[in-house]
Amino acid sequence: MKKFWPLAGLLLSLLIFPAFAEVQVSVSPASVRAGDYVDVSVSASREGAQGVIYSLSAGGETIFKGELTDHWTAAFRPRTEADHVLTVTVVYGKKDTESASVTVPVSGAAPVQEGPDVVYQQKDGWWKNKKYAIRSVQKAGCALFTLSHALQRMGMTGEDLLPDALARTYKAFYVEGRGTANESFLRKAGETYGFSTLPDLITSPDTIVSCLKRGDFFSFMIVTGHIALADRISESGDMVHIVDSAAGATYERIKGESPWIQLEDGTFAAAKTPEEMPGLRWYFETGEYGGAEYWLPLSYCAGQGMRLIRPAWLTLSDGAEDPVPVSVDYFGSLIAKVILNGESVRVPVTQLQWNCIGSDQPLIALVTRNGDAQFSDGDGKPVAGYNKIRYGTLLPVLEVQEDRVYVAWKDTFGYLSRKSVELLPAGETAFLTGQIAVNGKTTVASTVRVRREPKGKSKIMAEWKAGTPVAVVQEENDYLLVEGKGLRGWIEKKYFLADGGESNGQTVDERE
């Protein structure tokens, strides 16, 4: 998808020189379709001009009648196929004005704006009649534009990704006086589009950098009352790239900072005013600036708190078909239980793929700390509701750092100390599977104790029902080290029933 930046100097312009005045109006492009961006430049005939007034009509009906502004360059986006008449009035004094009009034929329709590089212009006038609950997408849709930007940068396509379509689907998440309830909105949308988010904002600079390097996105309140997208980190690791549907709102409300632009030599320079932002359009119909891409310091973004949008990080493939995204129920080093198309299935870990930063192969973290392991966020603070992980738990590792590992657990992500875990390679090709059994039966209402060590008096870690599927890691005397339900521990051999030819341990038992 093309970015619709100003094309002055590159496209043919229409210059109007009215007989009654010397006001000059330049309009581009020469051939305009509904949905195109039309750039306007006005030059006064003499010194002393106080400003200019823009007015626009189509088909004999007034679309817009403006007020005095000091913007001598502006833009509009026609929504209908008709001859549009643009009138500009240069004001020198209360009764001293000069006007010029130009007819802009609008024929045909521009392609729908979409694609991995799209930058929507929330304030271009196109969205003012697109409803979002009791408001319009133009007025209150910044979270919608942000999600649309993110989904399309994930490679998704389709009309359902467009901001106005998202507004229809998720109108229940609009809250009057607040805008979009972003966390619950993203959670619901994630169910449809296969991404995950977190209940808490991320404020750790290190975590933000790791996430962006991984390919994650952030939908965050860049300034009070306005949400934008963060989609990558600079090579220097201290600047965050922003996709903002309404950069004017950011300029108006940002405190102690300003957007930055990247120069040709790779360095960054502050764009302290909208006029210093290359390609940023001002729309006379709304009196506001449109969307833009720029950079902000990592420290500023972290201080705002950032809400994660994590594309599907785990995929399943048996080698015969393309990988498909799955979510985790529980993990092991041999067998994992995942959610595939809404259904639970146990699969060999060798059929799962995920990226483990800092390692040349996927890894599993086995909690080995005596007592529960501390599960923390990037700042070292306990994750609310998830602060302890018990001994023997198995977790997929997404990143290995010098003194900690970043893991997935339940429906969230966080850090464990390297001292609290043993890192295991993911999966073996041959291993024994079976079920917990009592007196050779898997359907009785009995439980079996799972212990830390292969001893009868060892600490009990859990109790599993008969019928629970397990995979065998090793054998020692009368005990088996097994994995089941995301936990590794010891059971007595007599409580294990190996799978037969018709039951290979890959189907979830209802008793699990």
Image: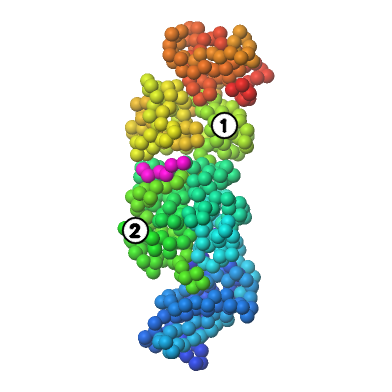
**Residue, far right:** 502
Residue at screen point 59% across, 62% down: 130
Q: Is residue 23 above or below residue 511?
A: below
Say whether disc 2 or disc 1 marks the residue closer to the N-terminus: 2
- The kind of residue on which mark 1 rests is Val
- Mark 1, other Cα within 10 Å: few <14 / some 14–19 / many ≥20: many
Coloration of the structure image: rainbow
Q: Is residue 105 above or below residue 504?
A: below
Residue picked out by circle 1: 338
Residue at screen point 45% across, 22% down: 392
Relative horizontal placement of residue 189, taking residue 371 as reference (left or right): right
Residue at screen point 44% across, 59% down: 293
Callout 2: helix, strand or loop? loop
Numbered badge on residue 358? none
The residues bearing labels 2 and 1 have C-alpha atoms spaced at a distance of 45 Å
The one of 507 and 127 positioned closer to us in this rendering:
127
Q: Of discs 2 and 1, which sits in the foreground?
A: 2
The one of 181 and 391 positioned closer to us in this rendering:
181
The quarter of the rendered structure image containing the C terminus is: top right
Which region is colored magenta?
Answer: 199-204
Please check the rendered image and state whether residue 144 is part of the magenta-colored stretch, yes or no. Answer: no
Query: Percent from the top left, x then y, of residue 30?
Result: 56, 76
Residue picked out by circle 2: 255
**Residue, far left:** 256
- The kind of residue on which mark 2 rests is Lys
Residue 165 quadrant? bottom right
Callout 1: helix, strand or loop? strand
> Is mark 2 in CB contact (under 8 Å) with mark 1?
no
